[in-house]
Amino acid sequence: MKNQYDYIVVGGGVAGFKSAETIRRYDQQGSILLVNNEDRIPYKRTKISKTLAVEVPLNAFVLAAEGWYHAQRIELVADEVLSFSIKAKSLSLKQGGRYQFNKLILCTGSAAIIPVLKGQAKKDIMLLRTAADHDRIKNTIKANDKVIVSGGGVEGIELAEQALKMGASVTLVHNNFHLLNKHFDKHFAGLIHQLLADNGIQVIFNESIRSLSNTGNGKKLVQIGDLIHTVADHILVSNGSQPRTELGRRAGLEVNKGILVDAYMQTSSPDIYAAGDVAEHAEGVVTGLWHAAEAQGVVAGSNAAGEKIAYHQRPYRLKLDIFDQYFFSLNMPASIMGYEVVHWRRNQAEYSCYFKDNKLQGMLMANDKDKAKLCQQAVHEHWSMAKTKKQLG
């Protein structure tokens, strides 16, 4: 490794990968260092919660083969950034050494929210954030184990499905009255709940895990809410995430929920950018979605390389693909006040569309996977009610 780079990108998720890739597109000569704090090359993280029960090599999900980095002259290092200095334009790595940069892009992502539990030791719960976590869970859960999953979002539901397919008995605990409550209405959430129940997954609503202790024989005594006490072999936690802002905060960047950025993904320091789950946009928006991180990485890399490209916030779809059924949500409004909601079924497919002034603003869909991209296009282009029904009905 050299000790000075034109560009240093911190983070091996899709935002970091896209930042480095895009820099090279605009600057064929500049030196690029991509710092990834995992022991493997960057991969599509959204795949790891879907593949616990099947034998799929993780290198099947790499964003680019190792040879690509050599061909693009992007230096990839598996290490952790301990700190950086805005004034000195340098950073230090855990394995040693301090490195100068002209431009820095922070793509540090988000960290799992770990619940505070009475009697709980951190080692007694399992999280899924990295490929190493994937390997640990895959090698730990055995047939006939009892697994409790905390969290009724996409990852929690996928974990429940995978644990069941591994032969475990599964209970899912969610702290709301319906699953995926930020993305689906009660009807679609009910379809998802019924699908889980039909496959043998018990769901406990509007409760959370309160305490956790060891029984002495390798099992965990779990309290759910005030009244439910049960024993489990494993606890998987998927209670959301929060931006990993520590590096930026310690260095003196402006930070709120995330590291504050403008439309060009520039932070409060002109030569430092942030993209992906760690970045906070206008009106306090932290996107937290894979495709948003991908787009932001492109913008950050472009502007670091001297372009002037603005990031335009747009809604990105959320999908859930479990037990051979597919659910899609894009820009569901928090309240239906002022919207005309149109619902229809076609064979196994089902839609709810949200219109305002005859313009499509949001959509929920079940079991019409082949039309998912068309659904996304319809919302982004604000199709009329007539066109939506004609194309999708």
Image (spheres, grey):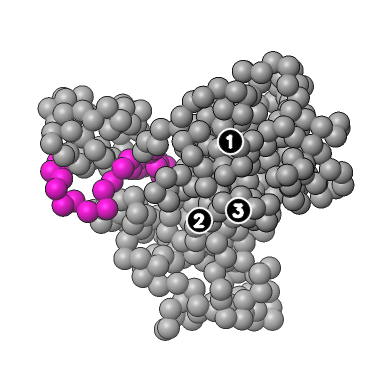
Which residue occupies 68% across, 68% down? Answer: 123
The circle drawn on residue 245 is 3
Extreme residue in the bottom direction: 227
The outermost residue toward the top is 28
Find residue 257 and name its label.
2
Q: Is residue 358 above or below residue 278?
A: above
Numbered disc 3: secondary structure = loop
Q: Which mark is residue 14?
A: 1
Mark with earlier residue (3, 1): 1
Q: Are marks 2 and 3 in contact (CB under 8 Å)?
A: yes
- Residue sitting nearer the eye, 387 or 294: 294
Q: Mark 2 and mark 3: span between their CA atoms? A: 8 Å
State the count of labels.
Answer: 3
- Residue 142: x %, y % from top left: 63, 59
| 187 relative to 389, above or below | below
Tell me the kind of residue under disc 2.
Answer: Lys
The image shows residue 309 at horizontal and vertical percentages of: 49, 25
Mark 3: amino acid? Thr
Q: Nearer the viewer, mark 3 or mark 1?
A: 3
Q: Is residue 305 magenta?
A: no
Q: Please give left or right for residue 299 compared with residue 19 in the image.
A: left
Three-letter code for the amino acid on which mark 1 is drawn: Val
In the rendered image, residue 320 lying in the magenta stretch gets the answer yes
Q: Is residue 110 above or below residue 104?
A: below
Q: Which residues are magenta?
A: 316-343
Q: Position of residue 168 (x, y in %)?
A: 54, 60
Mark 3 vs 1: CB contact within 8 A: no
Circle 2: element type: loop
Q: Is residue 140 visible?
A: yes
With 332 as the anchor, is 96 left or right in this view?
A: right
Mark 2 or mark 3: name the one nearer the start of the chain. 3
Q: CA distance from mark 2 to mark 1?
A: 20 Å
